[in-house]
Image: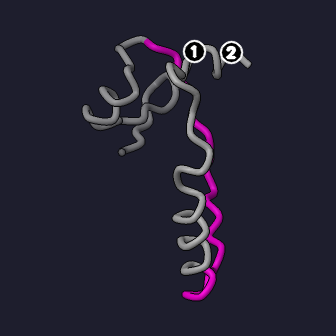
Amino acid sequence: MKLEKTADGYVVQVPDDVVAALGLHEGDQVKVAKFNPITIPVTEEQRRWAMDTIRELRGTNPLPPGYKFDREEANAR
């Protein structure tokens, strides 16, 4: 991405694939925010324990028959 100064302020050039993935269109209002990902150091032993735990829990709590996730309903909360 590239930041350019214009007479009215600043413009952020966003690649076409990012625009398409976000479903944006020319003229859409967007908000730019700072993102600080946190990296937590993990030992190989901790990683192995976590992966083993995930494997043990896989399939132990299946979803009810006919369950369908509704993204709109979840985002409305």
Q: Any magenta on residue 45?
A: yes
Amino acid of disc 1: Glu
Residue 10 picture location, percent across and down = 48, 32
Can residue 48 be seen here? yes
Q: Which mark is residue 72?
A: 1
Amino acid of disc 2: Ala
Magenta stretch secondary structure, dominant: loop
- Where 26 sits versus 15, above or below? above
- Where 16 sits versus 1, above or below? above
Decide if residue 14 is on the left or right side of residue 29. Answer: left
Answer few, some or many: residues within 10 Å of disc 2's Cα (few below 14, many 20 plus, some between 14 and 19): few
- Among all residues in the image, which is located at the extreme right? 77
Residue at 57%, 33% (x, y): give it.
Answer: 63
Which range is magenta? 28-46
Q: Which mark is residue 76?
A: 2
Nearest the eye: 59 or 54 = 59
Quadrant of the image occupied by residue 39: bottom right
- Where 22 sits versus 45, above or below? above
Residue 46 picture location, percent across and down = 63, 82
How many dots with numbers?
A: 2
